[in-house]
């Protein structure tokens, strides 16, 4: 998680420097390519390498379409000049972005089906240490749709995943006696919204790593039991509602 934060911090800093050059010295160039484009290109290359080399899943390793598309858009005028091609004959930027979006979605629709959380086996929302070749039940995984998940409050650990959709999480059996003092919920949210409805008398400890996304909602610091949120949020929203 610290690695991801440092990575995105470097991305934002280089992006800011690139925009400063774009505003102050737009014509300052190396090998006919403006300095600000070198810097933005370095960001995109870093993003590409980070996915290909350090991706946690096969789908993440193949997350190359958006970086490549943005690289093309960035240097499209220079490519036209270097290849002696009229700019109007170059592929339009919106077509390249649309192609990247479609390939990105197809990549995750297919390869996320084979995602195997290391060392975890999930039965009815419960996370257990088990063999790596076991899959979480599909009822806790949402892709390109809206769904509701009901988690058993008597269990100590749970897992939910959301991609390009909305997932609403509820807890049942909250009135059972002698519930575990702390429950861990691992959230994996990307390009979508995950809404977690938490009983009003519970405390919430939020350790979700959020990059290019946000975590909002009312959070109590104290309560008769604690819900510990872990996992990651990428380009999405995690909303916590205490009922």
Image: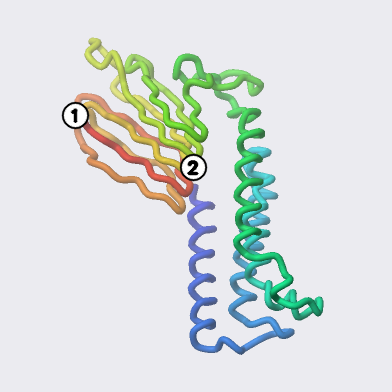
How far, Cα to Cα, is label 2 from label 1? Answer: 27 Å
> Does the residue at mark 2 contact the one at mark 1 (Cβ under 8 Å)?
no
Foreground disc of the pair 2, 1: 2
Please tell me in which quadrant of the rendered image residue 229 appears. top left
Residue nearest the observer in this picture, 80 or 197: 80
Disc number placed over residue 190 in the picture, else none: 2
**Residue visible at 23% across and 26% down in the picture:** 199
Tell me if 227 is positioned left or right of 15 in this view.
Answer: left
Residue 64, placed above or below residue 125? below
**Where is the C terminus found, in terms of image quarters?**
top left
**Residue visible at 70% across and 65% down in the picture:** 91
Disc number placed over residue 200 in the picture, else none: 1
| Colour theme | rainbow
**Residue visible at 49% across and 30% down in the picture:** 142
Q: Residue 215, position in %: x, y?
A: 35, 46
Q: Residue furthest right?
A: 83
């Amino acid at each position: 998680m610290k690695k991801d934060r440092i990575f995105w911090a470097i991305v934002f800093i280089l992006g800011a420097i690139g925009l400063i050059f774009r505003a102050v010295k737009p014509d300052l160039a190396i090998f006919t390519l403006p300095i600000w484009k070198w810097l933005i290109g370095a960001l995109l290359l870093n993003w590409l390498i980070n996915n290909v080399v350090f991706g946690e899943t096969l789908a993440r390793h193949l997350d190359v379409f958006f970086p490549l598309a943005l690289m093309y858009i960035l240097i499209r005028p220079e490519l036209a000049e270097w290849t002696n091609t009229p700019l109007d004959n170059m592929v339009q930027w919106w077509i390249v972005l649309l192609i990247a979006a479609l390939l990105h979605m197809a990549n995750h629709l297919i390869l996320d089906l084979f995602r195997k959380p290391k060392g975890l086996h999930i039965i009815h929302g419960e996370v257990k240490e088990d063999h790596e070749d076991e899959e979480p039940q599909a009822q806790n995984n949402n892709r390109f749709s809206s769904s509701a998940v009901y988690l058993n409050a008597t269990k100590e650990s749970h897992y939910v995943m959301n991609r390009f959709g909305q997932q609403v999480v509820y807890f049942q059996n909250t009135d059972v006696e002698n519930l575990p003092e702390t429950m861990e919920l691992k959230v994996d949210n990307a390009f979508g919204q995950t809404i977690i409805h938490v009983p009003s008398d519970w405390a919430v400890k939020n350790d979700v790593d959020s990059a290019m996304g946000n975590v909002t909602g009312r959070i109590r610091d104290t309560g008769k039991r604690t819900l510990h949120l872990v996992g990651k949020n990428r380009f999405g929203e995690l909303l916590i509602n205490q009922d």
